[in-house]
Image (cartoon, rainbow, N blue to C red):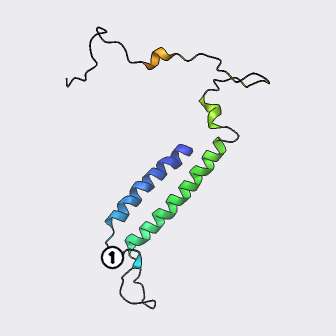
């Protein structure tokens, strides 16, 4: 169910971006510098503006649904608990130590040819 909501959410996001980009620019961003004063009447909403509102409301609803799913899946767990729990809990008088030593050999790049050869990038 969560995957379906996520796919719908992504489709709504893409379509919302597309609809906003297709709208005609009315100038005067945020209503600044528009004609008239406080008593100026606004024109009726265009169909494109109505579609934008509908997509925006649907986007917010799917965002809330995804938040509920994420909260339900993360009940009582910590990100640090998910990492692997590589350290044992500390006892009184003893500091916490790792249970498995870290293998640093896998962190180094593999050796090439000879030890005297400099590591120079090639444009092959």
Horizontal and vertical percent position of residue 86:
63, 23
Q: Residue furthest bottom?
A: 39
> Relative to 106, is 36 above or below?
below
Label 1 environment density (alpha carbons within 10 Å; few <14, some 14–19, many ≥20):
few
Q: Residue at x 65, y 32 (%)?
A: 81
Q: Quadrant of residue 25?
A: bottom left
Q: Residue at x 41, y 60 (%)?
A: 16
Q: Quadrant of residue 2?
A: top right
Horizontal and vertical percent position of residue 78:
66, 37
Horizontal and vertical percent position of residue 73:
64, 41
Horizontal and vertical percent position of residue 35:
35, 87
Q: Quadrant of the N terminus?
A: top right
Residue picked out by circle 1? 26
Q: Residue furthest right?
A: 92
Depth order, front residue of 2/105: 105
- In the picture provided, is 121 more to the left or to the right than 10? left
Q: Residue at x 71, y 23 (%)?
A: 95
Identify the secondary structure beneath mark 1.
loop
Q: Residue at x 40, y 79 (%)?
A: 31
Depth order, front residue of 68/40: 40
- In the picture provided, is 87 more to the left or to the right than 106? right
């Amino acid at each position: 169910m969560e995957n379906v909501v996520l796919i719908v959410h992504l489709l709504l996001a893409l379509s919302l971006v597309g609809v906003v980009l297709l709208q005609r620019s009315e100038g005067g961003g945020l209503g600044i510098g528009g004609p008239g004063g406080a008593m100026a009447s606004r024109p009726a909403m265009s169909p494109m503006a109505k579609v934008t509102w509908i997509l925006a409301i649907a986007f917010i609803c799917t965002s809330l649904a995804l938040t509920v799913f994420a909260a339900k899946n993360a009940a009582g767990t910590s990100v640090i608990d998910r990492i692997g729990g590589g350290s044992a809990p500390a006892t009184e008088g003893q500091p916490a130590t790792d249970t498995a030593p870290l293998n640093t050999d896998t962190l180094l790049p593999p050796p090439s040819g000879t030890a005297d050869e400099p590591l120079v990038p090639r444009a092959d």
